[in-house]
Amino acid sequence: ITLFFVVEDFAGILSGIINRIASSRANILTINQNIPINGLADITISIETEGMVKDIKGLMDEISEIEGVKRHEILARE
């Protein structure tokens, strides 16, 4: 699954997202963070969901609660 986020540009926000993904036991395949523009950065993360201990909706709900996450969506599923 490929996940997309728009986040505020401050230290530790990517770490918070990665920690939520790790706690769900998803396997991170790729991470791409663009240079922030006007205080916001786009992040795309591809994960492998085999072995996850929670569903993807639950994971996305948890990530959306992180301070500074302004937008989140699932871009693709394979």
Image (spheres, rainbow, N blue to C red):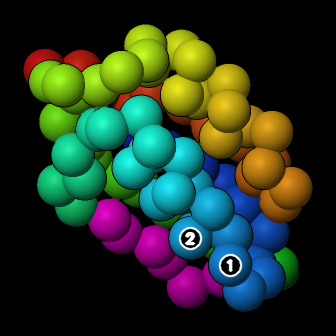
Query: Is the residue 8 above or below the residue 22 in the image?
Result: below
- Residue 32 in which image quadrant: bottom left
Label 2 residue SS: helix
Residue 34 in the image, given as x and y percentages of width and height:
49, 76
Label 1 residue SS: loop
Q: Which residue is mark 1?
A: 12
Residue drawn 78% across the image and 82% down it: 10
Label 2: how many residues lie within 10 Å, few (<14), some (14-19) or many (20+)? few
Q: Quadrant of the N terminus?
A: top left
Residue 55 in the image, given as x and y percentages of width and height:
43, 13
Q: Say left or right for 39 vs 56.
A: right
Residue 42 in the image, given as x and y percentages of width and height:
57, 63
Q: Check if residue 22 falls in the magenta segment.
A: no
Name the disc covering residue 73, or none.
none
Name the disc covering residue 15, or none.
2
Three-letter residue code for mark 1: Gly
Query: Is the residue 72 above or below the residue 54 in the image?
Result: below
Q: Nearer the viewer, residue 20 or 10?
A: 20
Residue 24 in the image, given as x and y percentages of width and height:
42, 34
Q: Say left or right for 41 vs 44.
A: right
Q: Say left or right for 27 vs 38.
A: left
Q: Nearer the viewer, residue 77 or 55?
A: 55
Three-letter residue code for mark 2: Ser
Query: Which span of residues is magenta-colored?
Result: 31-37
Whether residue 37 is visible here, answered yes or no, is no
Q: Say left or right for 20 vs 75.
A: right
- Residue 75 in which image quadrant: top left
Residue drawn 18% across the image and 25% down it: 51
- Residue 53 in which image quadrant: top left
Callouts 2 and 1 close, C-beta under 8 Å: yes
